[in-house]
Image: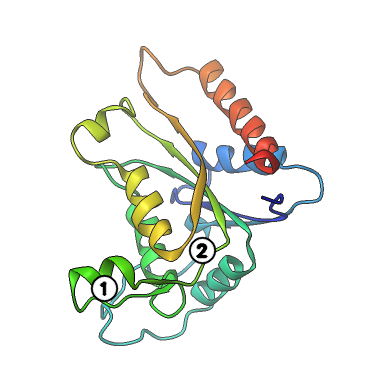
Amino acid sequence: MSQPRKVLIVIGHPDGQSYCRAIGDAYAAGLPAGCETELLALGDLEFDPVLRYGYRQHMKDDPVIERSQELVRWAEHIVFVFPVWWTAVPSLLKGWFERVFTPRFAYNMDNSSLFTLAFRTRRHLKGRTATVIATYHGPPWYYPLIGCSPVRVVRRQMLGNCGIKTTQVLRLGWLDSPKKDSQARREAFLAKVTTTAGALAKQ
């Protein structure tokens, strides 16, 4: 696989000064020379993250959503950085997915039967790859044990059903833990993120 040259980084934390933003910056800093980078910090953008009518009616055109779709089309590799809250991605990121990864843009699905749902989904975003980076207040291994793995949902359902293949996954647990978290530990993870970005050409 050739090295992706166009990289979109999506920060799913609503706080512009969060550790997730530092992770996104670290990934951008580690990308191989020649990469073009775009950043979408969702907390800095003004858009309605609620899919008001479901799929019954198209919502009013939104410049943020339109720009997001343009960047997804442009990107060869997309990086998603988010915290895990209540066993899921933040509502802001979930709403962005619902508004941006819409039918006809990201996929078309024939859901007339279980067979067609599984084998006749048209994935319009094929050819793109992704990195998923998640932070947790608890241990990352706990979530798959209870059947609630947000990273798996993002990889297989949100991205996989649209044709995007996740090639890199990083997790950091125990954030804000009095006994386990520290500045040195966070800085070591940022260094790991930078190294992971540098290895993008080898994926």
Point out which mark residue 45 bears. 2
Q: Can see residue 98? A: yes
| Quadrant of res 193 | top right
| Mark with earlier residue (2, 1) | 2
Q: Which residue is mark 1?
A: 116
Residue 192 higher or lower than 10, as above or below = above
Answer left or right for 114 relative to 190.
left
Instruction: Pick whichever, 149 or 95, lies toward us.
Output: 149
Q: Residue at x 26, y 77 (%)?
A: 54
Residue 53 higher or lower than 166, as above or below = below
Instruction: Pick whichever, 74 or 190, lies toward us.
Output: 74
Q: Are marks 2 and 1 in contact (CB under 8 Å)?
A: no
Q: Amino acid at mark 1?
A: Thr
Residue 60 higher or lower than 27, as above or below = below
Answer left or right for 194 relative to 87.
right
Instruction: Pick whichever, 143 or 108, lies toward us.
Output: 108
Image coords of residue 144 (percent x, y)? 26, 34
State the separation of the CA atoms marked 2 and 1. 37 Å
Question: Mark 2: few, some, or many residues within 10 Å (few <14, many ≥20)?
Answer: few
Image coords of residue 180 (percent x, y)? 39, 14
User: Mark 2, mark 1: which one is toward the viewer?
Assistant: 1
**Element type at marker 2?**
loop
Q: Amino acid at mark 2?
A: Leu
Image coords of residue 141 (percent x, y)? 31, 27
Answer left or right for 79 relative to 49.
right
